[in-house]
Image (cartoon, rainbow, N blue to C red):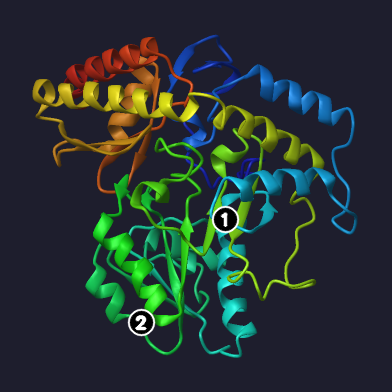
Amino acid sequence: MSITPLMPVYPRCDVRPVRGEGCYLIGERGERYLDFASGIAVNLLGHGHPRLVKAIADQAATLMHVSNLYGSPQGEAFAQRLVDNSFADTVFFTNSGAEAVECAIKTARRYHYANGQAHRHKIISFDNAFHGRTLGTISATSQPKMRDGFEPLLPGFTVVPFNDLDAALAAIDDDTAGFLLEPVQGEGGVTPATPAFLTGLRQACDDHGLLLILDEVQCGYARTGTFFAHEQYGIMPDIMAVAKGIGAGFPLGACLATEEAAKGMVAGTHGSTYGGNPLAMAVGQAVLDEVLGDGFLDNVKAKGARLRAALEQLIPNHDGIFEDVRGMGLMLGVKLRDSADARSFVAHMRDNHGLLTVSAGQNVVRILPPLVIEDSHIAECVEKLSAAARSFGAAEAA
């Protein structure tokens, strides 16, 4: 038998972690890595955080799962806290970001159905987006690497250029339900929406009776220095998908919506076997305790500014490789010049300098550390990044 027991859909590297300690991962041979990938923006509190570990252990010993046929005091309490600290009036809990985006799409379509306008089903989404790997979420993208071999995809999606307000407005027709976008594109290159673009979409939704759906799976939950990234734009969505940081490593996601946007989501219209289980809710509460704790968001802003400044200072010293720094908070990207390949550079840092990062579109290296990093971790990251830049050319030539 030639196929591996794990279906070979990931090009897995030689890093094989068996333990985590704060901002570090330790491999099965004892090798130590500075983790500035964080499970792709997931491990918000790093590895082995005491509050998170205790919450999991205590709840696992009490009650892990019951059917959603029963009442959920755990889910009700966590949902109320999210409502109290966001634009939303109601929450549906999922197990992943893709599920949260699926729920957001269904909520938007069901809204117009409830208003007697079932023809308004089309979602306008944007180039270079990443919304997940389900058939619904890949239908909302234009990237061949995610679509090839899975067609026919679901109808009802129109993809236009990101940060092009005129193109977005021109795509609106009588069948449009709303816009779906990441305020900061992650996999697409750590590209923030411009203020004019995002505020223009909000205004278009208000003018045309559309819904603004934000995918904050990667950029939300304190990653950019505010609880949610859209807060920095002075706008509010109608529906929002979150995941990744919300569980800090435990499988958890959520779809948040206003009461108006969720008017069609009545009993029987959606569900999830595991979504909102008591164990996940205990994890969510523990993470939220940290995120909303005194000084946490201010610290993310401060560390983000410090890390960005340090990265920007590297560019003149390695301008043959680095082009610019982009992003917000502790969701940063280093754009490489065409002479250097981001995937190759990420592998070089990982294999030769013990620094874990993630590549992205537009030849960008994503820098996504745990939100609990200290100044010493920033200094270590910059030192390793600089050393990798110096040795990269020689390694490529060899």
Q: Residue at x 51, y 48 (%)?
A: 217
Q: Is residue 73 left or right of residue 382?
A: right
Q: Quadrant of residue 208?
A: bottom left
- Name the residue: 27% across, 66% down: 161
Which residue is painted at 64% across and 41% down in the image?
6
Q: Is residue 298 left or right of residue 319?
A: right
Quadrant housing the N terminus: top right
Q: Mark on residue 340? A: none
The quadrant the C terminus occupies is top left
* Along the viewing direction, whichever of 146 and 160 lies nearer the viewer: 160
SS at mark 1? helix
Specify the quadrant of the image occupied by residue 357.
top left
Q: Residues within 10 Å of mark 2 (few under 14, many from 20)?
A: many
| Residue 228 locus on image (x, y percent) | 47, 45
Task: Check disc 2 and report its element: helix, strand or loop.
Answer: loop
27 lies above or below 359: above
Going by the image, does 117 lie left or right of 319?
Answer: right
The answer to whether residue 237 is seen in the rendering is yes
Q: Position of residue 381 (x, y in %)?
A: 33, 17
- Residue type for callout 1: Ala
Counting residues from the start of the chain, the first of labels 2 and 1 encountered is 1
The residue lying toward the viewer, choosing from 211 and 368, is: 211
Mark in the foreground, 2 or 1: 2
What amino acid type is highlighted by mark number 2? Ile
- The residue under label 1 is 98
How many neighbours does mark 1 have within 10 angstroms: few (below 14), some (14-19), or many (20 or more)?
Answer: many
Q: Nearer the viewer, residue 365 or 259?
A: 259
Residue 212 placement (x, y as % from top left): 45, 67
CA gap, disc 2 and disc 1: 25 Å
**Residue plotted at (32% across, 60% down):** 198
The residue where tag 2 is placed is: 172
Residue 36 visible in the current orientation:
no
